Amino acid sequence: MNNLVYLVAAYAFAWLAILAYLYSIARRQRRLEHELKVLQRTLDREKAER
Amino acid sequence: MAQRHNDLLQTLVALTAVLVVISLYTVFVVAPTEQTMGHVQRIFYYHVASAWVGFLAFLVACVGGLLFLANRSLLWDTVSAASVEIGLLFSVIALVQGSLWARPVWNTWWTWDPRLTTTLVMCLYYSATMMLRQLGGSEERSARVGAVLSIVGFVNVPIVFLAIRMWRTIHPVVFTTAGFAVAPRMLLALLASLLAFTALYACLLWMRIRVTQLARDISRLRHGLTSRRTL
């Protein structure tokens, strides 16, 4: 029965690590998409000014 | 094009979710409880699947490195770098799960067994390659360094796989020349886990590549903007 702790810990660790990695990718993607939008807007504004 | 990529990724994510649910069902419901070790033996399914994804990812990184050196396309460098990162994640998961399984079965968290030691060396090597990439300097130089390191590093992967066949070890051998050394319903759970984790790897690789490409687009746009302002 005590061994169940190890089983739960092993599966919990695997899923937590995968989810943490997924979260970090999603966060980086959101930040980059926002940055890309801002840059594109700046470029469009500069084009319009010329 | 971007919309088609999004749709394909969403389909892949949905398929992966279904495969993960099936794998969990086969692991906890279909697979029988092992008589000697009891429920803790169920760690085996995700432990092997994680180790498999580690090997696969390092193979993809090696092939990506070779293709980059052959045609200098940064896309292959992106694939290689992303694959090393994911391979390291899954190798660490396999190591930690192995340790959690070893504690009740071998009565120790860690032993310097050939399989464990070679896996640890492999993880340390790929962690070092990720750090060395950052020191590479220009994008081209960093990609070249990364390609060479992922090709050289792959030499260790067959050694890790064969360690339990070449040296005396307490680590069990599942894949023998006679086939799989497990009961049929256990084999089903193992195959379901392998399939689910392979799909998960494909999803993560795709997402990670997209992030690098976005960062590269931004860097190019920024460079364009700066050079336009200096003109």
Image: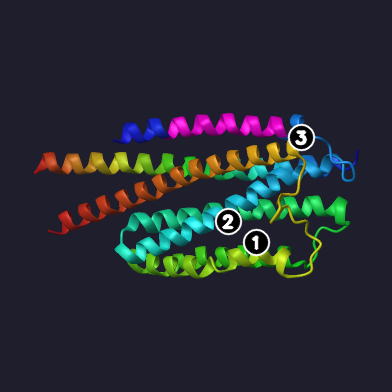
- Vertical side of B124 occupied by A12: above or below: above
The verdict on residue B10 being magenta is yes
Q: Residue B153, labelled with which disc?
A: none
Mark 3, Cα crowd under 10 Å, few <14 / some 14-19 / many 20+, is some
Residue span colored magenta: B9-26
Q: Are marks 1 and 3 on the same chain?
A: yes
Using residue B157 as the reference point, say whether residue B79 is left or right of it.
Answer: left
Q: Main secondary structure of the magenta part?
A: helix
Q: Residue B55, labelled with which disc?
A: 2
* Disc 2: host chain: B
Nearer the N terminus, badge 2 or badge 1? 2
For the residues marked 3 and 2, what is the alpha-carbon distance in whole angstroms? 25 Å
Mark 2 vs 1: CB contact within 8 A: yes
Q: Residue at x 18, y 39 (%)?
A: A45
Where does the N terminus of chain B fall, quadrant-wise? top left
Mark 2, Cα crowd under 10 Å, few <14 / some 14-19 / many 20+, is many
Which residue reaches farthest left? A50
Residue placed under numbered mark 1 in the picture: B161
Residue placed under numbered mark 3 in the picture: B31
Q: Position of residue B223 (x, y in %)?
A: 24, 56
Where does the C terminus of chain B fall, quadrant-wise? bottom left
Identify which amino acid the numbered label 3 is placed on: Ala
Identify which amino acid the numbered label 1 is placed on: Phe
Identify which amino acid the numbered label 2 is placed on: Phe
